[in-house]
Image (cartoon, coloured by chain):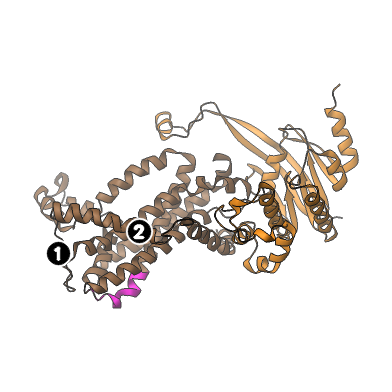
Chain colours: A brown, B orange
Amino acid sequence: MIQYFKDLLAARELLANLTLREVRGQYKRTIFGRLWSLLNPLATMLVYTIVFAFILRIQPDAGDPSGVDVFAVWLLCGLLPWAFFASVVQTGMGSIIANAGLVQKVYFPRIVLPLSLTGSIGINWLFEMAVLGVVLLFVGSFFLPWVPLVLVMMVLLAVYATGVALVLAIANVYFRDTQYLMGIVMQIWFYLTPVIYPVSLLKEPSESVGGLLGTPITVLDVYRLNPMERYVEIMRNLLYDNRWPAVEDMGYFVAIAFLSLAIGVVVFRRFENRMAELI
Amino acid sequence: MSIHAVSVNSVSKKFRLYHERNQSLKSAVLRRRRSVHEDFWALQDISFEVPEGSTFGLIGSNGSGKSTLLKCLARIYTPELGSITYKGRIAALLEVGSGFHPELSGRENIFLNGSILGMSRKEITRKFDEIVDFSGVEAFIDQPVKNYSSGMYVRLGFSVAINVAPDILVVDEVLAVGDAEFQDRCKQKFVQFREEGKTVILVSHAMDMVQDMCDQVAWLSHGKLVATGEARPTIASYLKSVEPQ
């Protein structure tokens, strides 16, 4: 295990170069270049805002204590992290197969392939969050004291997403069904995460159902097992409300993030040897 | 020469021959196993040693297991049994231009490809001019490699690889790239390698070239080692065995 991390440390330049390959290669020969990275979430934001704020009339509470009350901004605080997470999971999952030519011809620690995608998507995400930061200041959210914590949380999401991606990358080499299955899972997962609606909407139906199967566990308790639910709450607390997130939410997410990465690394290491012959 | 650059100790490599190639979850769940398969041993109990500073050839007919052994040596495949130990840094040249990104320039790709092959940024910067000179594509170094002719592409890839400067170089049949002049330069590079005391392991079907370059060879047939030894007599007996009766 120690040797494995030594090898990985030795491959850090390779990791940096592969990340740069993704970043530089991505928007080559486009007129708008890096702007495309912003246009995508912007378009999604526009669609969701029209559908959910104007047609379905979803009204999240105003930021407390910030007092900010703009649906589009509230949405983005959850949407940008989700988009990063989904993108890391889905491209990371396919990273080994997408680089089959490389895996079959050169030896290097294979783990750098999914890691480089976390890196390159992370760079785009940082760029998006910076723009969101400007918008937040503009609408009156004074989140600057929370910037260090936001950055820590961003790293933690990358940790969590990478762990998930590592397991799925291996699973996808052994079973190609994984990528199609995950297409569906991610869609369901998105709606199970309070990105486009506030959790408060769930309180009433959850209470009316009461404890499940005679236990005191409610629908809401089960719903809150989703680490992404906690994450979106935390980010909205910091960016939109400008207050400390609940300690148990933070603890829960930190634990899950590191657990995810640990499982990911162990699974990846265990199964990577036969990769070259299977793809 | 008692020091061995590479020791191959009873290496065996197994592949699965699938009767029903089925990488699907459905079959895994329904049958409680992934697929019906039969084991095929591509390499069986191979042992030999490569002396330090020698040029070592792997010969044998198609399907004899040369490439599988080469991939095991290059650490792309992991043998089921046995082990391979190295003394020094190893680099494998199984394909040129691995990991080139077509939209990036030749310059960017040298750094990318170099780091894939295990060079540090400092090393690449130091050798950059040499790499570019050797490839002969100076004029187009800032153009995206997708605009390169296939010859230029291969030459650039080869130049990066040859400059990795490992202690042990594992080479597949990539020497047959480029025009006559480029091939000549490659041969010189190998001579220089040998003079520097580096170890080279190569696979080739071109027997005159193997005889020309190698000190020792290992002859494989159907996944088993037939003989190892001095290049000339081993090649002669190999050629005799494949001659039509």
Kind of residue at badge 1: Asp
Residue A95 image point, x, y percent: 48, 49
Instruction: Compare marks 2 and 1 and give the one earlier in the sequence.
Output: 1
Q: Can residue A188 be seen in this view?
A: yes
Residue B166's disc number: none
Which of the 4 image quarters holds residue A101? top right
Residue A254, placed above or below residue A52:
below
State which region is magenta.
A141-151
Chain hosting mark 2:
A
Give the x, y percent position of residue B234. Answer: 87, 38
Q: Which residue is label 1 attached to?
A: A61
Q: Which amino acid does label 2 sit on?
A: Ile
Count of number-bearing discs: 2
The residue sitting at 51% across, 54% down in the picture is A113
Secondary structure under the numbered disc 2 in the rendered image? helix
Q: Where is residue A5 in the image (x, y as percent from the top left)?
A: 55, 61
Query: Residue at (16%, 44%) from the top-left corner?
Result: A213
Point out the image quarter for the N terminus of chain B. bottom right
Element under disc 1 = loop
Return the residue found at the far bottom. A145
Using the rendered image, report if marks 2 and 1 lie on a common chain: yes
Which residue is depicted at the point 75% across and 35% down? B224
Q: Is residue A219 above or below residue A63?
A: above
Residue where numbered disc 2 is placed: A256
With B115 as the anchor, is B24 left or right in this view? left
